[in-house]
Image (spheres, rainbow, N blue to C red):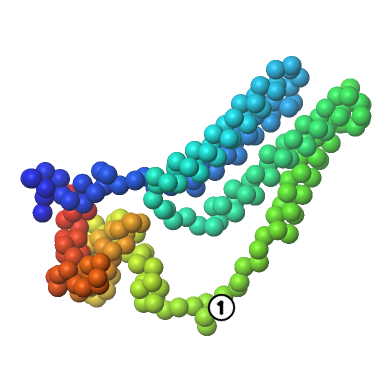
């Protein structure tokens, strides 16, 4: 069905839905931007403090922006803990750069060796590696231990997982969803178990409910015995 002969209802929803939280894609800015600013520590200038003043202003702005604006107007988005763990490990490059700058100026002041000898600057690399190693060691000490799960004995069945999460490999795979909509013959035998005509989206989990599920009103009474129009419509509202 279309609204006034125009967009399908699903497209109308897309036009007004909030954006996804994009924090996972901003990790590079949170690491590279401070790193570029800290490289200024290797340059002697009476105006270097201005760079760090702008860095402090940028950090304060991003904290307020994400805490009171972005998180409030955005919908949830899935990401793995590995991305956050990798970003946390890479952050060690930033304090290591500060320690390397300390060694650099120590050599220039003849405190860590002879300024005229290039071999004295090996301490810069040593302090950089030392800072990165200390950061990694500190993370390993503070990191909460993860429970090791024996997948052969304690893991849930596929059916139990699907019933709880609502998203599967099938409904999160755009190619498979398109096949389910327009070319289901290629799915072969048992295609009823793997068909996914409705793509999974956060905030639209109800689209993945079984077709015999009835909507309930505020008193818990069924609104209609018919399955939801979205579940019936499947791909017709999602890809046109």
Residue farthest to the left?
Answer: 5
Residue 108 visible? The answer is yes
Q: Nearer the viewer, residue 206 or 73?
A: 73
List the single residue furthest toward the top: 46
Horizontal and vertical percent position of residue 176: 28, 60
Residue at 35% x, 67% y is: 166
- Pick the residue in front: 72 or 92: 72
Asked if residue 152 is positioned above or below residue 195 in the image, the reply reads: below
Query: How many labels, in total?
Result: 1
Q: Quadrant of the N terminus?
A: bottom left
Left/right placement of residue 227 relative to residue 208 reads left
Q: Quadrant of residue 120?
A: top right
**Disc 1, SS:** loop
Q: Position of residue 105 (x, y in %)?
A: 83, 27
Residue 69 spot, x, y in % from top left: 45, 41
Locate residue 208: give its quadrant.
bottom left
Residue drawn at x 39%, y 77% as measured from the top left: 160
Identify the residue shown where x is 63% and y is 46%: 90
Instruction: Say whether residue 117 is left or right of residue 76.
Output: right
Report the residue that reaches farthest toward the front.
219
From this viewpoint, which residue is outermost toward the bottom? 153
Residue at which label 1 appears: 150
User: Which quarter of the figure has residue 165?
Assistant: bottom left
Q: As displayed, is residue 18 above or below residue 221?
A: above
> Is 163 positioned to the left or the right of 135 in the image?
left
Closer to the camera, 166 or 63?
A: 63
Q: Is residue 195 left or right of residue 110?
A: left
Q: How many neighbours does mark 1 have within 10 angstroms: few (below 14), some (14-19), or many (20 or more)?
A: few
Residue 187 seen in the current view: no
Q: Residue at x 22, y 67 (%)?
A: 217
- Residue 219's x, y, as percent? 24, 70
């Amino acid at each position: 069905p279309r609204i006034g002969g125009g967009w399908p209802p699903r497209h109308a929803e897309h036009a007004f839905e909030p954006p996804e939280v994009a924090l996972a894609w901003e990790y590079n800015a949170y690491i590279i931007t401070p790193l570029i600013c800290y490289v200024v520590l290797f340059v002697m200038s009476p105006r270097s403090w201005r760079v760090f003043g702008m860095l402090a202003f940028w950090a304060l702005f991003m904290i307020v922006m994400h805490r009171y604006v972005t998180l409030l107007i955005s919908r949830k988005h899935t990401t793995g803990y590995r991305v956050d763990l990798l970003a946390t490990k890479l952050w060690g490059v930033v304090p290591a750069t500060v320690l390397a700058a300390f060694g650099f100026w120590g050599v220039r002041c003849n405190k860590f060796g002879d300024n005229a000898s290039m071999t004295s600057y090996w301490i810069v690399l040593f302090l950089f590696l030392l800072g990165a190693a200390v950061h990694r060691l500190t993370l390993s000490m503070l990191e909460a231990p993860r429970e090791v799960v024996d997948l052969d004995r304690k893991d849930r069945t596929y059916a139990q997982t699907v019933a709880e999460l609502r998203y599967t490999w099938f409904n999160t795979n755009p190619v498979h969803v398109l096949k389910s909509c327009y070319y289901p013959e290629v799915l072969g035998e048992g295609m009823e178990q793997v068909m996914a005509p409705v793509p999974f989206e956060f905030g639209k989990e109800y689209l993945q409910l079984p077709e015999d599920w009835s909507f309930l009103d505020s008193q818990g009474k069924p609104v209609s015995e018919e399955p939801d129009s979205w579940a019936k419509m499947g791909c017709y509202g999602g890809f046109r």
